[in-house]
Amino acid sequence: MHDKNKRFLIDVPPPTISGNLHMGHVFSYAQMDFIARYHRHIKGEYLVYPYCYDNNGLPTEKLAQAAGVSDQDKIIEFSWHESIAYHILFMRLAMGWSWHHYTTFSPFAVKLAHLSFQDLVDKGQAYKAEREYYYCPLTGVSVSQNELTEDGCYERSGAKVELRRGEGWFIKVLDNLPRIRAAIDQIAWKPEMYKARLLAWLDQCNTDWSISRERKYGIPIPGEPPGIVFDTWHTSSLSPQLAWHEANQYEVTLKCPIFDVRFQAHDIIRTWALFTIIKSVLHNDQIPWRTIVICGHALDDQGKKISKTAGNFVPPGQYIDQHTSDGVRYWAAQPQVGSDTRINPVVMEYGKRCCNKWRNAKRFLDMRTDDAKNKAVWEEWLGFKKGIDAAFDQYDWTEAGYLLFTYFWHHFCDVHIEACKKEAMSGTLRAIYDDMREYMGVFMPGTLIEKKDGRDTPVRPHVPN
């Protein structure tokens, strides 16, 4: 049972419906899941941790068009069918979502996008003007300064942008820079260096946020002719509200509590992170989350970022088939917060072996008949446990995993189980094993499954919240 008064709110990055998911997604989503499972299973908190996806952008539109789908309603339906493969992969990865769910092009998301726009217009924070803007000739859409690389290319296409002039809608950024900077400073950044990176970028910011686009697919801007729609970030920047109000039966309001944490990649800091901060400041005069955790990228054998565009990846299912989801999750737990890492099947296989070791330890303890206690051994575990909790509370899953697996392999198994063959202490070891199980399940949910009569039997049933 989880107490709704002890809640933990996670602003989940909704993956874009744009093709197959790859190991980069597995890498970062597994790391987020370590924190979610810790707060649910160890701290007993009620989670808002939604399964969600983004079907409101240009990548979804292009994917649908490549499949011969162009009508807006049909594209939304198409994105739902495409999302099934995402859901299956996340299930195989043993993601511990709460029961909440949202998309960025649902009827509720449309209402929220319109409400956000009207609130900003009423406050004088959104305005319509004719001015120069950046245009990507390859995709045929206008783009904001935030979406440009250092050499003036559009991030999503790699094409050099053109400077054009036209009329559009903007949200005031330049006038609000002191408030935005103050909000960025209030948030705990993991790692801290990414806060400095965003603040440095703001030093170079010289335009307001362009939120209107000339596209056939998108949420229409009220009062504008057909084909004038909101930029996808206008809706994605409302992800805390989408998650919170989905959890509270779709109350159409911009008010929501400050979330505990946002997880995201470092290549969208100046878009998704910044835009969410801006919306939270302008709508509610608050920060969107207390902490933001910036995840690294998974790299191929050559050290290059794995991406859909590059196509340099093996489908994640193949790694799960060979090394189990627990092995893959163990690999994702090794790098420091915010750091990139290469795909490493050797590490995955070690994680798979760790699960086998866990089950073998259980079989050994089941064969012991004594219930003897050893206070020193128990207190040693409590010392490790305290360190694990402290690491998790700082979003340091690497240190937490290091302490847990070091204790299990080199203390519990190598020392105490061996000593148990000569000295009676099975009562203490069983108590440690049971206490350690929830921590092991944070990283490797498969350790919560026991083999009985040839069948997989959960140690306890998984009930989301």
Image (spheres, rainbow, N blue to C red):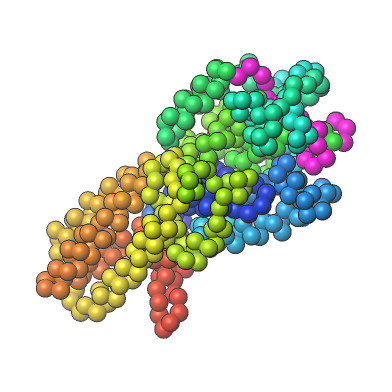
Whether residue 367 appears in magenta in the rendering, the answer is no
Q: Residue at x 27, y 49 (%)?
A: 386
Image x and y of residue 61, in percent: 76, 46
How many numbered markers are drawn?
0
Image x and y of residue 370, in percent: 18, 76
Q: Is residue 327 visible?
A: yes
Whether residue 218 appears in magenta in the rendering, the answer is yes
Which image quarter: residue 97?
bottom right
Residue 264 vs 177, above or below: the answer is below
Q: Residue at x 45, y 42 (%)?
A: 340
- Name the main secondary structure of what is drawn in magenta: loop
Which image quarter: residue 347?
bottom left
Q: Residue furthest right?
A: 225
Residue 155 vs 35, above or below: the answer is above
Which image quarter: residue 422?
bottom left
Task: Give the extent of the magenta segment.
Answer: 205-226
Residue 230 vs 107, above or below: the answer is above
Q: Residue furthest left?
A: 422
Q: Residue furthest bottom?
A: 453
Image x and y of residue 306, in percent: 54, 47
Q: Residue at x 25, y 74 (%)?
A: 365
Q: Nearer the viewer, residue 109 or 360?
A: 360
Q: Residue furthest front?
A: 302
Q: Residue at x 81, y 52 (%)?
A: 69
Image x and y of residue 176, in percent: 61, 18
Q: Is residue 243 visible?
A: no
Q: In the image, 295: left or right of 439?
A: right
